[in-house]
Structure formats: C-alpha cells, structure tokens
Image (spheres, helix red, strand yellow):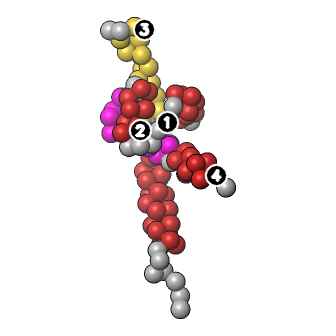
Amino acid sequence: MKMDNTKAQMKKGVLELCILSIIKNEGEVYPSDIIARMKEAELIVVEGTLYPLLTRLKNSGLLTYSWKESTSGPPRKYFSITDDGTDVLEDLRTSWTQLVQAVNHSIEENNHTS
C-alpha cells in the first residue's frame, strides 16, 4: 500500500469540514484565501480540487456566493456559508470529534484487554 495515497485519502475526507469552517470563521472568502488557509494548516489543496467542491457545496445549499469588484482584474466570486451550511458544519464537527475520539481510543497502546 502506498502511504502517500492513504494520507491523501485521509485529508480528502475532512476537506468539507475544513472548508466550511474557514468560510464560517471568515464570513466571506475568495477561493485563493481558502487555499492559503489550508496551506497554513499543512492541508494542501489545489484549485482543481477546491472549485468542484465549492460548486457541490453551493449546489447543496450549504454555500452562497456574491460577486465583488476587484482592483486587479475582473469581479471575484466570494463564498459565504448559509444557515443550512452552518447546521451541516456543526454536524460535521460533532462527527469529527467522535471519530477522533474513537480512533485515539483504538490506537492507544494501553488500550488492550489482558
């Protein structure tokens, strides 16, 4: 098994949680800002991954967007989270916390029966 592929799959599984969290925390976000924030957290995501995910989240009613004028070119699309998106984010956070606890419990060295 290729370890890089395993690590990539693990990261892909939490992208929605991370992206929704970033947008919730920032209010309105331009996609390149999401990429920058993800890089800061060492969760590298490329435009080819991010844009389809943003479109899917928007089509699911979890995000909305608005166009804003740019001083350096054409108008830019800024994303913000909807009420439904906030609800889904809270569910994802709860699921993530439960998953982390379960994984930590299962991998603890002292967690075995005698």
Which residue, given by chain and number where applicable, does mark 1 sit on? 45
Q: Residue at x 36, y 39 (%)?
A: 40
Query: Disc 1 to disc 2, how far (Cα)?
Result: 7 Å
Which residue, given by chain and number where applicable, does mark 2 sit on? 38
For residue 2, which numbered disc appears in the image? 4
Dots 1, 3 in contact, CB < 8 A:
no
Dots 4, 3 in contact, CB < 8 A:
no
Is residue 65 highlighted in magenta? no
Earlier sequence position, callout 4 versus callout 3: 4
Earlier sequence position, callout 1 versus callout 3: 1
Answer with left or right where residue 50 lies relative to residue 90: right
For residue 74, which numbered disc appears in the image? 3
Frontmost residue, 2 versus 104: 2
Quarter of the image where the N terminus is located: bottom right
Dots 1, 2 in contact, CB < 8 A:
yes
Q: Position of residue 63 (x, y in %)?
A: 47, 33
Q: Position of residue 29 (x, y in %)?
A: 38, 28
Query: Measured along the vertical axis of the image, is residue 35 above or below residue 103?
Result: above
Query: Measured along the vertical axis of the image, is residue 77 above or below residue 102?
Result: above
